[in-house]
Image (cartoon, rainbow, N blue to C red):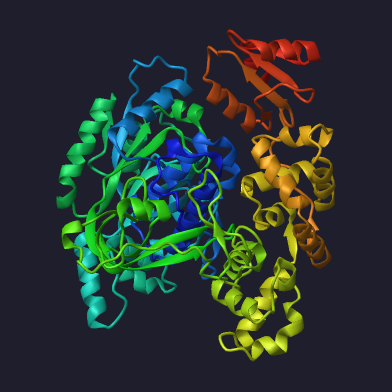
Amino acid sequence: MTSRYRAKPITEFNIFEAESEVIALNQEIDAHDEMYYRHDAPKIDDFNYDSLRQRLEALVRQFPGLKKLSPVLGQVGATPSPGFSKVIHSHPMLSLANAFNDTDVTDFLGRVKKFLALDAEQNIEVVAEPKIDGVSASLIYRNGLFVKGATRGDGAVGEDITDNLRTINDIPSRLKKGFPTTLEIRGEIYMTKVAFTELNAAQTISNSKVFANPRNAAAGSLRQLDPTVTATRNLNFFAYTWGEISELRAVTQIQFFGMLSNWGFKINPLTKLCSSAEDLLRHYHEIEEQRPGLSYDIDGVVYKVNRLDLQKRLGTISRAPRWAIAHKFPAERTETILEAIDIQIGRTGVLTPVARLRPINVGGVVVSNASLHNEDEINRKDIRIGDTVVIQRAGDVIPQVVEVVLQKRSQLSKPYTFPIKCPSCGNETKRLEGEVARRCVAGLTCRDQVIESLKHFVSRNAFDIEGLGEKQIYLLWGDSFISSPGDIFRLKRHRVALEKKNGLGKRSVENILNAIEKSRTIKLERLIYGLGIPQVGQATARLIAINYQTLTSLRAVLEKARDKKSLEYAELLNIDQVGESVAHDLIDFFGDEINQRILSDLESELKILDGELINVERTALTGKTIVFTGTLEKMGRGEAKSLAESLGAKVVGSVSSKTDFVVVGGEAGSKATKAEKLGITILTEDEWLKLIA
């Protein structure tokens, strides 16, 4: 799914446009994660992918209420393949935030200083190292011996590829002296350009798969079930950080690199310690100039705060550390022919035009389609079928039709006419006031809207029903086997008929039915997410499940919350990051008669597990609600909030009767006054620091 708003600057969005764009970006990113991490067959390059994430992050910053509609922001990688044993990472393998220009880099340093409450003019030492375009790996050593290796997987659980990693010469089987008892080293597996060329030549001769680029070749080689195949591939490894470690004697990142070398690992020789933004950018451009002549592929430069104590204070947010960022290299543009324009219908009825392009290879990735966003964008750029168009695969939108090459336009070309009837069901479409989107108004009588909703329901982060994908849903819906989510759990009644259908077969039906039965027991948070409620992503669904525990309780509360003066409505708004917009969508969804029938149907078919409380080590702040107000002197507001949450507290923005503590800094204002009137415990910054010590 691509959004009709993709060409629109983020600063011009209203909340409804932002919601649509966030949903589209989540679906795109999730699909790309699956292709990249599970199938080693990315459809877009890293810069392209990272730009999608950057746009999503920018939208969520501007519209914080949509954060919970953005589950992919908290995801790293994809679930491990069933072909390998699973390895649970003792510490999550995170990804990195991205910078795409010089301003992003200075902004990153500014955020670090603000978080640490440092003077804006104060320099911070930062380590810069090339970002290898390879595959992340984790190596575990016990008493100096390599005992286990794994892929990143989804960041929490990876694939056990120990035997394959043993075939790589750069990975020492035994460490040199001075190593800790337990040591997990993380780094990047890569294939050199020469090795890649030689491998593809051999693959061609043997009529085997030819790889698109060295990264894909490295990933495919690592994920061989037969280690002897991996051994024939020339792979290399650069180490760059640690995970689990029994004793860390280093005090800086650059010092740790020295320890890596002493233990027998290779670190990138272009790594450099910089003392200012100017130094970082100078080194970035030096590496960029050297890039074509390097023996391996890189796609940017990684910057890491050098002092490890500052890294610890900065901590992480979502899927990435605050103390590091990847400065990516720019991508390229190219020309191709726009052969057709198709219209896709999303589950909310939005009509999205998609350009079908004459396939063209750009940076090792074949591009065959791109979003055209909406009818206004087509008219503004005067895009026509048959035009030669410029495709951009970097920046704000990827891939995107940047412009038409007018001098190559045929004299017979005609302006494109956007359909006013839904291509899926033939019903009327409308543009609501203030929206650029055109929507099909048929709702659940429109085939594509129903199918998109069902696809979301069975998706990985919802009910995760393996084998019940887009093709099967189209097939089953078209033959009236399923028309609502509850029908999925009654498919076993039609086993004989299903086994006779073309495109299924006995074994396929057996697998699907087994997967359905497995998903019949579901966590409340996954059910809520699977319902596809606008603005309710995984994180919001989990918060709702934690707060209301059961679906019965949730339905009853939301019924009463229709009265905005009710206690139930006030409590709903008191859930962290659930504002009036999200509350409105929840109440409307649960109040709809069709949705009520769907929910009752699901309750009769499912075993719904109660919401789980967050599992954190109990501290003095566990379960407490905290408000920070005023200016803190000894740490930034962001650091204080992060620290409180790590200790089990919930940080909210407003004071209410449910607030446990209000921490006041300089110029505290009305929140402190309200807390005093309500008899809430007020802490000074020093008292707060003593409490958490």
The x and y percentages for residue 231 are: 33, 69
The x and y percentages for residue 424 are: 54, 70
Residue 399 versus residue 57 in the image, above or below: below
In front: 610, or 331?
331
The x and y percentages for residue 37 are: 44, 60
Q: Residue at x 62, y 85 (%)?
A: 507
Image quadrant where residue 614 sits: top right
Farthest residue to the bottom: give it: 500
In front: 333, or 562?
562
In front: 78, or 13?
13
Residue 113 versus residue 604 in the image, above or below: above
- Left/right of residue 201 with respect to residue 598 in the rendered view: left
In front: 442, or 136?
442
Image quadrant where residue 603 sits: bottom right
- Left/right of residue 635 with respect to residue 104 in the rendered view: right
The x and y percentages for residue 183 are: 47, 45
Q: Residue at x 20, y 63 (%)?
A: 409
Please say whether residue 156 is visible from this viewpoint. Answer: yes
Residue 443 versus residue 620 in the image, above or below: below
- Left/right of residue 552 with respect to residue 161 in the rendered view: right
Q: Residue at x 76, y 60 (%)?
A: 594
**Figure quadrant of the C terminus:** top right
